[in-house]
Amino acid sequence: MNPETEGILEALREARRLLLITVRDITDEQLTERSTVSELTLGGILNHLTRAERVWTHVLTDGTGRTPDGMWDMDQYKAPDGAAVATSVTAYEEAARATDEAAAKALPDAEVPLPPAPWEPGVVRHWQTRKILLHLLQETAQHAGHADIVRESVDGANSTARRG
């Protein structure tokens, strides 16, 4: 793997680690508890980021520009019925590993066709591998911050204090 990709993945792994600190020691009930004015729950955030890892890994490896299943499904922001912490975390970790493996094989400058966006029908955009990984990093970091606020509202736990 080239140093640039390794550096981006290192930052992405850190953002993932912070997200997982946020959900550490919560119950299955807390996973789906709505604790702020937002509809986001810890389970919904974890589900969305698991889907994001899978979707972007598919885009990166498929190379056709076809829309992966569920890419635009707004229910990805909700925890699935019967969601459990252990299975949600395992699914996220497996999706993250698949992303890392795909990224390690990809060239940073490779042009990857993106699926058409519903708001731009017929427009085909291309992103380089690095931009896909940076997008995933940005998405993970943003939602890890959301998760921290939701968690603190659930039980007062603060991810920054729990980093050790």
Image (tube, rainbow, N blue to C red):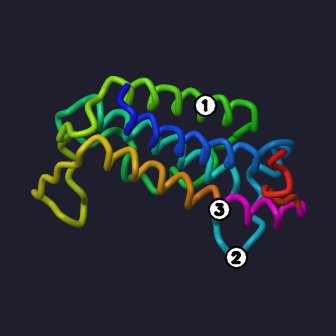
Say which residue appears at 51% left-offset and 50% top-offset.
Answer: 76
Cα gap from disc 1 to disc 3, whole angstroms: 18 Å
Is residue 147 found left or right of 152 in the rendered image? left
Say which residue appears at 85% left-offset and 50% top-offset.
Answer: 162
Q: Position of residue 105 (x, y in %)?
A: 33, 23
- Farthest residue, direction left: 122
The quadrant of the picture occupied by the N terminus is top left
What is the magenta range? Answer: 145-156
Q: Which residue is mark 2?
A: 37
In the displayed structure, 23 sits above or below 120; it is above
Q: Tag 3 or tag 2, which sits nearer the N-term?
A: 2
As helix, strand or loop, the secondary structure at mark 2 comes to loop
The quadrant of the picture occupied by the C terminus is top right
As helix, strand or loop, the secondary structure at mark 3 comes to helix
Q: Are marks 1 and 2 in contact (CB under 8 Å)?
A: no
Report the amino acid beneath label 3: Gly
Q: Position of residue 159 (x, y in %)?
A: 79, 55
Q: Which residue is mark 1?
A: 93
Number of the label disc, if any, that sits on residue 145 = 3
Residue 72 lies in the magenta-colored region: no
Is residue 24 found left or right of 73 in the rendered image? right
Quadrant in the rendering for residue 25: top right
In the displayed structure, 100 sits above or below 123; it is above
